[in-house]
Amino acid sequence: MRLTVNESASIVRLSIELRPQLLALLARNRLPTDDCESTSAEYFGVINNAQLIAAGGLQGQGDHALIRSLVVDQAYRSRGLARTLVEFLLCKASDAGKASVYLLTETAESYFQAMGFTLADRAEAPVEIASTSQFSRLCPATASFMKLDLSQK
C-alpha cells in the first residue's frame, strides 16, 4: 500500500532518540505511556519532515504478540497509515512465528473487526498476554479485547 504522506514515507524501527516523540504523540492522543520505557515492545513508526506522525508497537510474548500504542497524528488520519502499520506489525509477528496477535481498544473495535480481528474473552487470555501491563493495569476493563489467529490469515 502506498502512503500518501509523501514519496519518501516508510515504516522505520523507532530508535531511542525518537522515544520522546513517541511519548508525546501517545500523550496527545490520550494513550498510555507509563510502560513504554520498560517493556520489551518494539516500536515502529512513520516519520515525515523529522516528525513522528504514526506509530505502533509489537510486544512478543511466547507464541503470542500484543499490538500496542497504535496512534496516528490527527493531521495525518484517513490516509491509510493505521492500516499500513497494523499490516506491518502482523507481518512482523508472523515472521517471528507467533500463532496469534491480540490488542485492546476503547475506540476502534469495528475498525479492527474489519481487519479480521474478533472479540475475545479477557478471562481466556493467554497468560503471556494477561501478564502485560497493557492488559493487567493500563487499559481499562471496559476496553475491547481482540484476537487475530495468524494461522488463518
Image: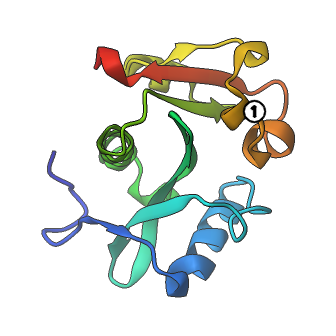
Q: Secondary structure at mark 1?
A: helix
Report the colour scheme: rainbow
User: Does 2 sit above or below residue 149?
Assistant: below
Q: Residue at x 54, y 83 (%)?
A: 16
Question: Seen in the image, is 148 located left or right of residue 62?
Answer: left
Front-most of residues 29 and 115: 115
Q: List the residue tagged with mark 1.
A: 130
Number of on-image labels:
1
Question: Seen in the image, is 114 located left or right of residue 128?
Answer: left
Front-most of residues 99 and 19: 99
Looking at the rendered image, the quarter that the C terminus falls into is top left
Percent from the top left, x then y, of residue 140? 84, 34
Q: Residue at x 80, y 62 (%)?
A: 34
User: Does 129 sit above or below residue 69?
Assistant: above
Q: Residue 125 appears in which quarter of the rendering?
A: top right
User: Does 129 sit above or below residue 31?
Assistant: above
Percent from the top left, x then y, of residue 103? 59, 33
Looking at the rendered image, the quarter that the N terminus falls into is top left
Percent from the top left, x then y, of residue 73? 50, 60
User: Does 147 sit above or below residue 11?
Assistant: above
Front-most of residues 102 and 99: 99
Q: Residue at x 52, y 87 (%)?
A: 17
Q: Amino acid at mark 1?
A: Ala
Number of residues whose C-alpha sits closer than 10 Å to that of mark 1, classed few (under 14), some (14–19) or many (20 or more): some
Q: Residue at x 36, y 38 (%)?
A: 97
Q: Residue 96 appears in which quarter of the rendering?
A: top left
